[in-house]
Every structure is written in C-alpha cells, then in structure tokens.
C-alpha cells in the first residue's frame, strides 16, 4: 500500500471534518471561560443545536435556516444556564452538568419524529482557483461552508480578545470582576453575553454534527464531543490559536489510530482509543510545567459567582 | 424591579424551605410538561415520586442506587471546598471495580473470610492510585486536575473494556466480554433478606460520618473553612495547597474506588464492560445539591436516586420515553439549584442602593 | 434522621403489605376477566438509535398490531448493563408482566437471577447462552446474511479491498467478519478485508470517520457491524458502495446501499406472545437465520448487476435448503493452517465462541 498525495489529502479532509465540531464547541467555551464562567453543559447545548438545526433544515429545505435555528437553540439553553448561575448564583459546575442531562433528554424528545430521516447534508464549496492548488489547496479549499466558518470564527475570536476594547473588557471581567466592576463595566451583562456566545457556538457545533459530519439525527449523537471540547479549552490554555491546533491534534490522532488499525497494526483497539486522551494529558503536562503561559492566560476568576453589591 | 440582596448570614429557615419551593415549582412545571405530552399528571407524579418507594423493596433499591452517589459526593464535597476540582470520580470508581474484581477473580472459589476485605482494600487502593495521577500532575507539573481527571475517566473506561475482553474474561463464557460471576465469599452480604441492599450501603453511611467529622471536628475542616473565605489562609492551619490537593484527591479516590468495588461485588456480581451508569458524574450534582455538606449530600443522593427510579417507573407504568424523564430530571435539578439562592439572598423589590462595594465570592461558590 | 427513616420504612411496610394483599385478591379475581397479556421489553439503547434497539421496538409494535387490546406492551429504554438491569427486569416482573424480553447480551445474568424469583413469569433473553425453565434464549444467525454480503462484495469490488467497521471484538462480530470473508474469497480469492474497531455500537461521527479511513486506504465497499447509517452516508459521499445494518438504510444512501441485513424479530415476538396466551410457552434455545425470516434483506440497490443478484439469491437459497453453509470447510486461519477440513462444517459450539480470523482478513484480532 503506497501513500500518495491524494490519499494524504483525503486523510486531511477526514481530519478536518472530525476536528470542526470540536473547534466550534471549544472556541465558544473559550470565550465563556475567558469571562470567568465555566459551563460544563456543552454536550447538552450541542445536542439541542443538532436536533433543532436538523429538524428545521429538513422541514424547510434551507440549511441556513437550520443553522440559525440550531444556533438559537444553543443560545436558549445557554440562557437557562446564565440565568441560574449569573442571576441566581447557582453553582456553575452543577448547573452545567444538569444542563447536559436536560439537553440530552430534550433533544431526544424533540428528535423522535426525525429518526430515520435522511438529509443530504450541507454542500461543499470549492473556492475557485485556490481549490486547484495541489495538496494544500485541495485540502483547505474544498470543504463545506461551516468549515471555512470555523476558521473565520477562531480568527475573529482571537482578534476580538487581543485587539478590541470589548475583548479587553471580557478578559478583565474574567480576571478580576471586582476591578472591572469598579471601573464601571457591567460584569453580569458581559458574562451573559459571553455565555450566550458559547451557547451559539455549541449549537453550531451540533449543527455541524447533524448536518455535515454525519447528516442525520440520532439520539446522543454528539457521543462525548462536548466534553472533549471542554478539555481542549484548558489544553489550549485559553488561546484560540492553540485551540485550533489542539482540535486538529485530537482529531488527527483519532483518525490516524483508525488508519493504523486498517493497516493491520497489532495493538488492542482499546489501547488505540486511549491514545488521544493520553496524548492530551502528556501535552498538558508539558505546557503546564513551564507554568508561565498557563498563568498568563487562565482567567483568574473562572467559575466564581459575582455579586456587585455585597 | 426584582433585586437580590445578600443576607448578613445564610438563612437557616430558607435552608429548609428552599428545597420545598423548588419541589413545588417542579411539580407545577411538571404539570405543564405532562399536560403538553398528554400524560395524566397525577399518575405521572405518582410514578415518579411515590411508586418507587411504596414498598420495602423499592426503598431498598433506593438505597442501592443512592449509596454510591452519596459516598462519592461526600468525598467530592470536601475536595470542592478545598478548590480541588476532581471531576474524574467515575474513573476512580472504575479502577476500584477493576482492582477489587481482579482480586476476587484471583481468589476464585477460595472460600475464606479474607477475600472480601482484600477486595475492598484493593478497590480503595485502585481508586486512590487513579486519583494520585491528577494529584501528582497538579502538584508537580501544575497540570489542571479538571482536565487530567476527566481524561483519566475515558482511559479507565477503555482499560476496563480491554480487561474484560481479555485477561479477566470468563474462560467458560464463549469469549463474551464479561468476567466470571463472583463466588459467594467474594460477594457483599445482603443486609435485608429478599432485597439487593448490601453492606455497601453501610459503608456509605460510614463515609458520611467520616466526612462530617472531618469537616466539623478536625483542623482540616477548619482549614477548609478559612480557605474558603480567604484563599491560602488554610496555610496558617498547617495545610498547604499541595497537601489539600493530595488529601482531597486521595480521599475521593478511596471513596470512589470503594463505591466501584461495592457495585462489582454487590448488585452486579461480576466485571462487565461498563460497571457504572455515570455515578461519578452524577455525584458531582449530588455534592452541590447537598451544598457540599455530608448531611445535605445524603438527602440530595436520595432525591437523585429517586429521580432515576421514578424515571424507570414512569416508563413502565405510563410508557413515557426515557427522554421525558431526562427533561423532567433536568428541570428538577435546575429548580433545586436555583432555589438555593434564597438561602444567601433576600428577594426585594425596588432599585439597588447607590453605594456599592463590589466583591466576588470565592471558594465553594463555584 | 437515620432513626426516622427506619420508622418510615416500618410504616411503609404496613402500607405495602396491605397493598400486596389487595393486589393478590384483585389478581385472583381478574383471571376470569381475561386480562390482557402483559409483555415487557428491556432495551440497551434508545429506541431512536435506528439500529439494534429500534428493530426490537418494531417487533414490540408488531405484537400490538397483531393482538390489539389483548396485549399490553411496555418498554424501558437505555437501561445500562450494570446494576440497573436487574432492578428494571425485577420491576417488570413484579408489575405483573407475563413475558419479558431482555434484548442485550449484558442482561444475561440479571435475567436469570430475576427469573429464579419469578417462576411464573416467562423470560426471553436475546443473544445469551444461559437458560432455565422459564428463560429462553434467542438470537439470529446474522452470519448467514454476512455470507450473502461477502459474496456480493467479492464480485463487485474492483480494488479488492473491503472495509469492515467493527464495534467490539466479541464472537458475534468476529463470526460475521469470518462468514463475510469466507464467502468473499470463494468468489474472489484476491480480495481482502480490512477491519477497523470503533469501540462503540453507536457513534455516528466515529463510524463515519472509520468508513472514510477505510475508503482512503483503498476500500471500495464498506460494511459495518455498528448501528448508525453514517458509514453508508460516507460511502455515498465518496462514491463507493456499502451495506446497511439492522434496518433498510437506503434512504440515507440511495446509490451506495447494495442491500442491507434486516433484523426481523416481528414474527418471533408475535409467536412467543401467542404461546404465552395459549399456555404452551416452553423454554427453548432459538438461533434462527434466513430460513425463518429472522435475518431478512432490503431490496437490492440500483447499482447491483444482475449476475451479482443471482449469486446472492443462490447463497440465500443454498442456506435455506441446507446446500450451503457459511462455515463449510476447507477453512484456513490467518496463518494458512486448515482449521476446518474439506466437507466438514463448524458446529454451533465453536461458532458461539469464535475468537480467530480466517484467511483473507488483514491484521490481528485484538484480544
């Protein structure tokens, strides 16, 4: 079996589709956490996005309407979370877990009429000229629109956090809500907006699952990807660029272990499946032990409730 | 305009009333949910809350289901008070099950008194070893324990799958992925005849007592209290953050490992590819519902267990899909979590005062 | 608090004793009124999985359609195979169900435990091997269907690489891989099977990844022993062929699906329910295949040539009339050693615990 460039391109495309839902879900959660909120309900929001996006796309025939609905559904669940944790100051960890239970149940309930229905999926869009560039162009410029969207989103979030005043405020609110409040910034409103953004991204990730990755609806089809997205945020030490790398690293290992199996490499499949998790821990240890970058980027007040008039 | 005003100190009264308020709201919104789905409301509530515990057997099953949740949640509570975010109790539970189960299989058909204690010891050690990994990585390399403990949970699940597909597989079981059935000397004694309530439930109560003593009668409890109010103040009580990390994780690993062993040597009676329906994760919710207090955790664990039993009973008696029970359970949890706001805050009408002194709460508020 | 809960237990016991007494008198009185027969099902997944559990639920609905208000059916879905299973089964039994189907291998021991305590309730456990006077086992010889698929794949492949997506390396799946491979090599000795394990029965994303991986490695036909239509969708997208699993999945891949093995429990479930109604239910061990209709097939896809259809039909007929057995010797293992001699046929006992690959499967079987 020889490995030629066209095979590499195909492997690359598979990795891209495996990584994209992780990118969406994780980049949203990154902003949420940057504002000092930890929402563990990503899995639930993804499923809500997946089921509603699929349903609307199927009913109306419009992928765009589907994606918008999925985004809206993710935001709706995020709103419940935000109200409970920000307005009512419930525990963020527990509320996030409850949100997951709720989202799994709700999506299954809503999705019952959608079982066994096929959907052709979001079409690919080849960028003229660029898609003809061997290997790199074929790899990067013949994907579906959501994939391009994921790259744009990571870039936008990166620029937003680094260069805009609003991004600065988000970071300030996450690092030191007291100081931000003293300066007159609306801490709760910022956190609300960040949480809603996270919900929108998780909804988008869900849409990618049910409309592009494996275009169908099936209960609990996210199969733990929301949790991996959460891990990726920490793995990336809250940096968008590194997050993108992390998602592709994780997606890449998942795909490559499948390839190793198909090549007949004799390792128990469970050990193979462990690889991505072991690698994540190893890389995390390497990054964390240097210390500085983690300390610089970690939102200091993550998970802590804030009340302006204590 | 509705506004929340912090109380000078937590309201004791509200501590009792808040869950009741949550229950009432859950019932009201449950009525809406069931009415929308065309399910008779009264029958639904009966199935969820009454039917599962309307017999002695039902109560014993409540104990079987609640015991692992309670013992893990007690240990998690202590860790969370110390700001040690172990969310990998599920993995520690699995390792406890693996190690304890492996001992039982090693002594297969050895009918001796020491088999069961050895298994328990192995379960505890297995859980502790698995918890020691995030502790080591956190204290030595500053690696975030939320992430490492979560990753280790996935690895633990795959390890169990690997073992029951291979070395621990029942040699007479046609290569199906499960171990032999544990023999009698390796099975936890039943407390109540005719039920599945085993002595593991007693170990859960024992751990509740230990947790309570740790929190209220020891220097550690004091350290956790001051640590909660002013981070790192615990140092004055002789507890560095590193010691707290090690202690919290190892204690939780021990409890979760024992819980895993209890499942394997109790109601399951063998090693299967999956030995826990997510007890380690559910226990996190239980810990917070119980307000990170051992006694509160007991009640929270029972409520949580009841909601699972109720879900099964609603499926059987009303043909409700499991999805509905998930939605209902989620709602119940939302309201219970939300109602706790009343303990620390007063709901008042009118505009906020102008004089503001900003502050954020630390510690156990996460 | 502990004391008060003991109190509660004591008073509840009184109440429950009264309830039991009331129920007993009720049930003895109602025998005359010809109560509907209650049939319970325990499912390992959600009925919305469009695979294994979905097909069992179709069987449950077939019972309802057949007997109308003479039956009452109940199901509990997503019951994990650990400590919860026994409680659910016991609850169904104590709620007055007459017949209980437990539809996953992992329910074997809990089913038998509960059956001991409820000698009057009939139990049917799918895919297991432990039986009792009131516990039957049933399963389908899906490997017969796999032999049909293997024949078609062997004839239709151009790259001589077939991609096989496995869930877990248990005998049921290994048996399927071997039956497929043996039949494939009979018509095409050059072809080989590559297996990728995804360690899940059901993860559309990962199944899709596995299918793409195999296609990237040159497979031009994909087959699967996992439940979602995702691999077929991937095949459709990449312009290769594949087979559906458990139900007809042509809606998901109209061009790619060559055919599909369909789990058809309907007739079995209806018959066993009838047996309970007529009072002649007996414990048995059923392992039926194409012959009884338990293993059925979807229509051939538009891309299946006539000669392939004819060959596949011939295999089906051969299996039904006994002239063809998927595990007929000579069969060689991967090392090329003959494990089944010419003319001999592997017995059910060996098939049940199959733990090696035959010649033609790439890579080693994970243990």
Image (cartoon, coloured by chain):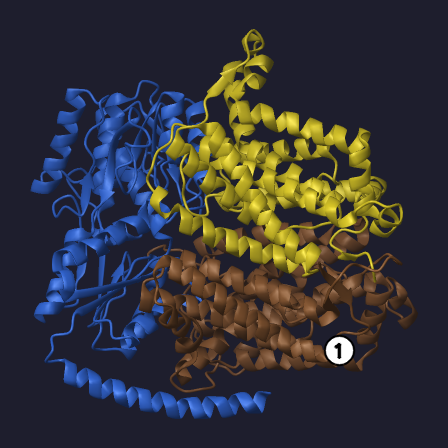
SS at badge 1: helix
Q: Is residue C281 left or right of residue B356?
A: left
Q: B282 and C324: which one is in front? A: B282
From the top left corner, tell me how far across and down residue A76 is, in percent: 56, 46
Q: Is residue A137 left or right of residue C217?
A: right
- Residue at 50%, 21% (x, y): give it: A10
Colour of chain A in the image = yellow
Within-10-Å neighbours for mark 1: few <14, some 14–19, many 20+ = some
The answer, for residue A296, to whether it is visible in the render is yes
In the figure, B99 relative to A76: above or below?
below
In the figure, C161 relative to B167: above or below?
above
Quarter of the image where one finds residue C95 = bottom left
From the top left corner, tell me how far across and down residue B50 is, in percent: 42, 77
Quarter of the image where one finds residue C155 = top left
Colour of chain C in the image = blue
Q: Chain of mark 1?
A: B
From the top left corner, tell me how far across and down residue C245 is, in percent: 30, 39
- Residue at 33%, 49% (x, y): give it: C171
Q: Is residue B65 left or right of residue B243?
A: left
Mark 1 highlights which residue?
B214
Q: Give the residue furthest to the top.
A: A129
- Residue at 23%, 86% (x, y): give it: C24
Quarter of the image where one finds residue C128 = bottom left
Q: Is residue C108 left or right of residue A294?
A: left
Q: Which chain is brown?
A: B
Q: B153 and C205: which one is in front? A: C205
């Amino acid at each position: 079996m020889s490995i030629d460039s066209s095979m590499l391109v195909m492997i690359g495309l598979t990795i891209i589709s495996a990584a994209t839902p992780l990118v969406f879900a994780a980049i949203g959660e990154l902003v949420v956490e940057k504002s000092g909120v930890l929402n563990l309900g990503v899995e639930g929001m993804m499923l809500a996005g997946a089921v509603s996006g699929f349903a609307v796309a199927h009913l109306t025939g419009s992928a765009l309407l589907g994606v918008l609905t999925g985004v809206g559904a993710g935001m709706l669940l995020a709103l419940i979370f935000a109200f409970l944790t920000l307005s009512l100051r419930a525990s963020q960890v527990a509320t996030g877990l409850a949100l997951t239970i709720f989202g799994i149940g709700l999506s299954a309930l809503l999705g019952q009429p959608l079982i066994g229905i096929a959907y052709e999926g979001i079409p690919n869009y080849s960028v003229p000229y660029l898609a003809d560039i061997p290997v790199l162009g074929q790899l990067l410029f013949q994907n579906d629109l959501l994939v391009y969207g994921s790259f744009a989103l990571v870039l936008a979030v990166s620029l937003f956090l680094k260069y805009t005043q609003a991004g600065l405020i988000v970071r300030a609110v996450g690092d030191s809500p007291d100081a931000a409040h003293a300066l007159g910034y609306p801490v709760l409103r910022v956190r609300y907006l960040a949480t809603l953004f996270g919900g929108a991204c998780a909804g988008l990730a869900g849409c990618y699952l049910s409309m592009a990755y494996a275009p169908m609806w099936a209960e609990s089809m996210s199969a733990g990807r929301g949790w991996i997205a959460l891990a990726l945020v920490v793995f990336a030490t809250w940096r968008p660029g590194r997050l993108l790398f992390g998602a592709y690293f994780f997606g890449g290992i998942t795909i490559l272990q499948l390839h190793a199996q198909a090549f007949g490499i004799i390792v128990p499949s469970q050990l193979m499946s462990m690889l991505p998790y072991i690698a994540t821990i190893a890389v995390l240890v390497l990054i964390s032990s240097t210390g500085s970058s983690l300390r610089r980027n970690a939102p200091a007040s993550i998970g802590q409730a804030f009340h302006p008039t204590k | 305009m509705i506004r929340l005003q912090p109380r000078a100190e937590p309201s004791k009264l509200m501590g009792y009333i808040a869950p009741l308020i949550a229950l009432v709201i859950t019932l009201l919104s449950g009525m809406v949910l069931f009415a929308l789905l065309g399910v008779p409301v009264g029958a639904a509530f009966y199935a969820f809350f009454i039917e599962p515990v309307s017999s002695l057997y039902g109560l014993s099953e409540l104990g079987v289901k609640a015991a692992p949740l309670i013992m893990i949640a007690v240990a998690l509570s202590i860790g969370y008070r110390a700001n040690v975010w172990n969310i990998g109790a599920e993995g520690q539970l699995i390792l406890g099950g693996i190690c304890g189960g492996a001992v039982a299989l090693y002594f297969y058909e050895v009918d001796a008194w020491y088999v069961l204690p050895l298994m328990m010891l192995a379960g505890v050690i297995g859980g502790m070893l698995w918890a020691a990994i995030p502790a080591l990585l956190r204290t030595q390399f500053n690696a975030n324990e939320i992430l490492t403990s979560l990753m280790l949970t996935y690895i633990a699940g795959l390890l169990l799958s690997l073992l029951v597909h291979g070395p621990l597989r029942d040699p007479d079981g046609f290569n199906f992925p499960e171990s032999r059935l544990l023999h009698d000397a390796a099975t936890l004694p039943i407390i109540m005849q005719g039920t599945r309530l085993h002595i593991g439930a007693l170990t859960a109560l024992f751990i509740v007592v230990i947790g309570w003593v740790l929190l209220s009668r020891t220097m550690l409890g004091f350290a956790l209290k001051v640590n909660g109010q002013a981070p790192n103040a615990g140092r004055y009580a002789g507890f560095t953050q590193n010691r707290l990390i090690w202690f919290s994780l190892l204690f939780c690993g021990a409890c979760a490992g024992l819980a895993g062993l209890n499942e394997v040597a109790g109601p399951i009676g063998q090693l299967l590819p999956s030995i826990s329906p997510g007890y380690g994760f559910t226990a996190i919710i239980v810990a917070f519902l119980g307000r990170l207090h051992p006694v509160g955790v007991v009640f929270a664990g029972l409520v949580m267990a009841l909601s699972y039993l109720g879900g099964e009973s609603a499926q059987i008696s009303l043909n409700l899909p499991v999805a509905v029970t998930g939605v209902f359970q989620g709602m119940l949890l939302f309201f219970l979590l939300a109602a706790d706001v009343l303990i620390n805050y007063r709901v008042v009408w009118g505009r906020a005062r102008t004089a503001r002194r900003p502050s954020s709460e630390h510690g156990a508020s996460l | 608090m502990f004391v008060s809960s003991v109190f509660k237990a004591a008073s509840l016991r009184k109440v429950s004793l009264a309830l039991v007494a009331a129920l007993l008198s009720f049930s003895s009185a109602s025998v005359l009124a010809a109560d509907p027969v209650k049939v319970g099902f325990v499912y390992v997944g959600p009925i919305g999985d469009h695979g294994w559990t979905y097909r069992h639920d179709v069987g449950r609905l077939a019972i309802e359609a057949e007997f109308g208000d003479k039956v009452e059916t109940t199901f509990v879905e997503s019951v994990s195979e650990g400590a919860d299973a026994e409680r659910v089964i016991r609850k169904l039994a104590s709620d007055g169900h007459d017949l209980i189907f437990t539809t996953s291998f992992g329910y074997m021991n809990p089913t038998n435990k509960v059956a001991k305590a409820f000698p009057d309730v009939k139990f049917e456990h799918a895919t297991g091997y432990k039986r009792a006077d009131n516990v039957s086992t049933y399963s389908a010889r899906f490997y017969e269907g796999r032999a049909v698929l293997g024949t078609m794949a062997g004839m239709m492949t151009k790259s001589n690489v077939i991609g096989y997506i496995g869930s877990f390396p248990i005998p049921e799946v290994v048996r399927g891989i071997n039956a497929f491979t043996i039949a494939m090599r009979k018509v095409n000795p050059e072809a080989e099977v590559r297996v990728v394990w995804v360690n899940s029965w059901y993860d559309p994303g990962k199944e899709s990844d596995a299918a793409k991986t195999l296609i990237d490695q040159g497979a031009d036909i994909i087959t699967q022993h996992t439940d979602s239509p995702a691999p077929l969708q991937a095949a459709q997208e990449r312009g290769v062929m594949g087979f559906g699993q458990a139900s007809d999945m042509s809606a998901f891949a109209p061009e790619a699906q060559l055919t599909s093995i369909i789990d058809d429990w309907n007739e079995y479930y209806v018959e066993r329910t009838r047996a309970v109604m007529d009072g002649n239910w007996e414990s048995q061990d059923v392992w039926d295949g194409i012959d009884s209709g338990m293993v059925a097939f979807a229509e051939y896809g538009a891309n299946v040539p006539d000669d392939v259809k004819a060959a596949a039909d011939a295999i089906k007929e051969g299996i039904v009339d006994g002239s063809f057995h998927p595990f007929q010797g000579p069969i060689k293992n991967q090392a090329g050693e003959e494990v089944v001699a010419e003319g001999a046929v592997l017995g059910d006992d060996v098939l049940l615990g199959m733990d090696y690959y035959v010649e033609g499967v790439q890579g080693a079987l994970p243990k």
